[in-house]
Image: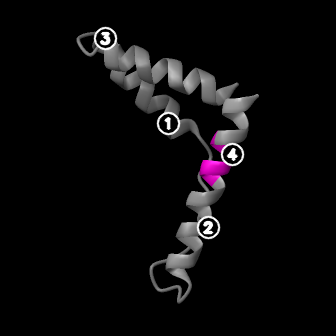
């Protein structure tokens, strides 16, 4: 549900760039999301962890998109 609302809000933002509240609403929504620390810059497994997180996000998007 969140993903659908985010996509709709993003589309609204892109279609109504002249509406001054549209960008702020979109950015507020993004900043309200919980943040997960995946790795740190000095982590020896930095690349592997980033790639795994990207794969996980892509898979989650596929699952949500098909539901």
**Residues at marks 3 and 2, CA–CA distance in whole angstroms:** 35 Å
Q: Indicate which label's residue lies in the foreground, 1 or 3.
A: 3
Q: Is the residue under label 4 in contact with that under label 3 (CB below 8 Å)?
A: no
Q: Which mark is residue 46?
A: none
In primary-sequence order, the first of circles 1 and 2 is 1
- In the image, the segment drawn in magenta is 57-61
Q: Is the residue under label 2 in contact with that under label 3 (CB below 8 Å)?
A: no
Q: Is residue 58 left or right of residue 31?
A: right
Q: Residue 58 magenta-drawn? A: yes
In primary-sequence order, the first of circles 4 and 1 is 1
Q: Is residue 26 left or right of residue 23?
A: right
**Residues at marks 1 and 2, CA–CA distance in whole angstroms:** 22 Å
**Residues at marks 1 and 3, CA–CA distance in whole angstroms:** 18 Å
Q: Indicate which label's residue lies in the foreground, 4 or 1.
A: 4
Q: Which mark is residue 52?
A: 2
Q: Indicate which label's residue lies in the foreground, 3 or 4.
A: 4
Q: Position of residue 11 (x, y in %)?
A: 42, 19
In primary-sequence order, the first of circles 1 and 3 is 3
Q: Secondary structure at mark 2?
A: helix
If the image is split into quadrants, where does the C terminus sit?
top right
Q: Which mark is residue 60?
A: 4
Residue under pointer 3:
16
Q: Position of residue 34 (x, y in %)?
A: 62, 46
């Amino acid at each position: 549900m969140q993903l659908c609302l985010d996509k709709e809000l993003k589309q609204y933002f892109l279609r109504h760039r002249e509406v001054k509240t549209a960008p702020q609403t979109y950015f507020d929504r993004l900043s309200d999301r919980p943040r997960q620390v995946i790795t740190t810059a000095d982590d020896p497994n930095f690349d592997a962890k980033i790639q795994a997180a990207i794969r996980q996000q892509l898979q989650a998007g596929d699952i949500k998109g098909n539901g």
